[in-house]
Image (cartoon, helix red, strand yellow):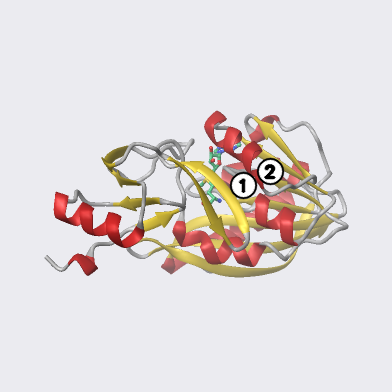
């Protein structure tokens, strides 16, 4: 066995692997990375709450602090997903806002986008909405850990968020059925218009068309028009399918 070929992701001092490892492989990885725990993710992460199914192969502690792009993220890998594939997007989005803006992160998780935006763009306020109590707990921890005073974490379904026409910018970092939340996003967007970062998983054959059709349909339905957009590829999601994010700018009709 060529140990160097073992694939893993390092989150803080915890390793995530996708296959079972034998004792020699575990010893090799522990020596090489000085990790405290090795966790195997059993299945793809599913469900609205994005909860992983795991097996611990080494150690016992599943909470760690991951440092990325100058931000600290406390996370329990047994309860919450961490997507390495979104690293470049977390960096990219971090400087797009500014000190004049109100931002709403409709799917905040532990603060994957909220924390870097709050730190590097320093908007007036970011409302960070999160449904999963475990993620909300770590979101609140991460706000403290990064010493941020411009983030308002809110536990609950984003469809129950009561502020209307407040956001200059909305992050919709969710996949598979993000379009179902677009009407709510337009309710939250400022009446004059603003920017929505709209994520979608989409087959490459319709990558240029479907997300834009959906954005046009829902914006017009809600009295907005799509002025400008740019489609950014984040990562391959499955064969032929991309996780993309559209930076979409709207104004009122
Ligand atoms: N953007 C993250 C990244 O870079 O890895 C991934 C966030 S994760 C895919 C989506 C988050 O949205 C989860 O934490 C989930 O609990 C939350 N969520 C799902 N439905 C929601 C809803 N209706 N309201 C608020 N949060 C929701």
Foreground pick, 220 / 140: 140
Res 22 visible: no
Foreground pick, 226 / 235: 235
Foreground pick, 50 / 64: 64
Q: Residue at x 19, y 56 (%)?
A: 25
Task: Please give the count of numbered marks on the rendered protein.
Answer: 2
Query: Cβ(mark 1) to ligand 1 < 8 Å?
Result: no
Pick the quarter of the image with the N terminus: bottom left
> Residue 112 location in percent, x, y?
59, 51
Q: Residue at x 60, y 59 (%)?
A: 213
Q: Earlier in the sequence, mark 2 or mark 1?
A: 1
Res 42 → quadrant: top left
Q: Which residue is mark 2?
A: 143
Label drawn at residue 111: 1
> Quick one: SS at disc 2?
helix
Res 5 → quadrant: bottom left
> Residue 215 location in percent, x, y?
64, 56
> Residue 229 location in percent, x, y?
68, 68
Would residue 165 be found to the left or right of residue 180 on screen?
right
Q: Is residue 142 above or below residue 2?
A: above
């Amino acid at each position: 066995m060529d140990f160097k070929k073992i694939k893993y992701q390092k989150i803080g001092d915890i390793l995530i692997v996708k296959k079972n490892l034998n004792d020699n492989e575990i010893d090799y990885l522990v020596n090489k990375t000085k990790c405290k725990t090795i966790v195997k993710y059993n299945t793809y992460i599913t469900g609205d709450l994005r909860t992983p199914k795991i097996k611990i192969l080494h150690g016992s502690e599943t909470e760690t602090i991951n440092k990325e792009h100058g931000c600290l993220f406390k996370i329990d890998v047994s309860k919450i997903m961490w997507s390495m594939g979104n690293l470049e997007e977390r960096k990219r989005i971090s400087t797009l806002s500014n000190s004049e803006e109100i931002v709403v992160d409709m799917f905040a998780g532990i603060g994957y986008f909220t924390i870097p935006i709050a730190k590097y763009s320093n908007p007036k306020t970011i409302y960070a909405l999160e449904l999963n109590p475990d993620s909300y707990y770590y979101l609140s921890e991460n706000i403290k850990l990064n010493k941020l005073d411009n983030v308002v974490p809110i536990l609950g379904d984003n469809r129950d968020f009561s502020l209307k026409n407040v956001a200059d910018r909305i992050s919709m970092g969710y996949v598979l059925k993000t379009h179902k939340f677009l009407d709510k996003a337009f309710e939250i967007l400022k009446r004059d218009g603003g920017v929505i970062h709209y994520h979608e998983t989409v087959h490459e054959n319709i990558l240029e068309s479907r997300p834009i059709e959906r954005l046009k349909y829902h914006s017009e339905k809600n009295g907005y028009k799509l002025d400008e957009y740019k489609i950014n590829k984040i990562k391959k999601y499955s064969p032929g399918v991309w996780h993309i994010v559209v930076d979409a700018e709207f104004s009122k009709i």
